[in-house]
Image (spheres, helix red, strand yellow):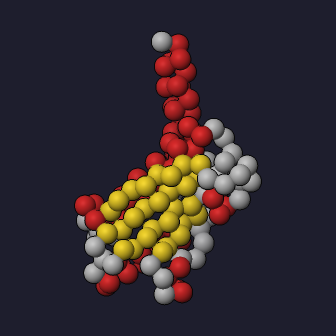
Amino acid sequence: MACAFWRFWHLVLIVTALVVATPADAQTATSAASQGGGRFLVYFDEFSAFLSDEAKTIIADAAKRAREAGARRIVVQARASATGTAETNKYLAQTRSSIVTDQLEADGIARTMIRQEPIGQTGSNDPTVTERRVDIIIEP
C-alpha cells in the first residue's frame, strides 16, 4: 500500500513539473519539411512537454503536409533523454505524444489517422536535446 502511495505522489510531481514548464524553456528545431521529407521533429526541454509557438508551427506544417499528400497514417514517436528514471521518462514520452496528437487533431487531422508510439527513454545518460523529441512521421 505504501509503495502505491509513493508511486502516486511520484506521478503527481511529474505532472506538476510538466504543467509549470515555462514557455521560455521550450526548445524546438526546424522540421524536416524544408528538406522535403515526411518526418517532422519537435524538440523539448528536459522534463518538459510544453509546446512553444515554433513547435505548434512545425506540427501545423506536418498536418498540412499530411493532408496535401493524402497520408493514410501519421505516427507520433515520443522520446525522452536518459536522465531520470526509465519509468518517469516513459510517462514523459506518453505526455509528449498525447500533447502532439492533440495539436495535430486541432490542426485538422482525424485522431483515427494518428498512431502514438511513446518510446520513452533513449540514448545514454547524455541529456542532449536530440533525445528529447517527438518525431511526426507521415506515412503515404
Image coordinates for residue 53, horizontal then vertical, percent: 51, 68
Q: Which residue does the image show at 51% across and 32% down from the upper left?
A: 12
Q: For this rendering, which residue is in front, 88 or 12?
A: 88
Image coordinates for residue 30, horizontal then vertical, percent: 58, 77
Q: Is residue 81 left or right of residue 134?
A: right
Quadrant of the image occupied by residue 65: bottom left
Residue 101 in view, yes or no: yes
Residue 28 versus residue 89 in the image, above or below: below
Residue 55 versus residue 99 in the image, above or below: below
Quarter of the image with the C terminus is bottom left
Image coordinates for residue 119, horizontal then vertical, percent: 50, 52
Residue 18 versus residue 24 in the image, above or below: above
Q: Is residue 22 left or right of residue 93?
A: right
Q: Which residue does the image show at 58% across and 64% down from the upper left?
A: 43
Quadrant of the image occupied by residue 102: bottom left
Residue at far top of view = 1
Image coordinates for residue 83, horizontal then vertical, percent: 69, 45
Q: How many marks?
A: 0
Residue 23 in view, yes or no: no
Q: Which residue does the image show at 48% across and 12% down from the upper left?
A: 1
Q: Which residue does the image show at 48% across and 87% down from the upper left?
A: 36
Residue 112 versus residue 33 in the image, above or below: above
Q: For this rendering, which residue is in front, 95 or 24?
A: 95
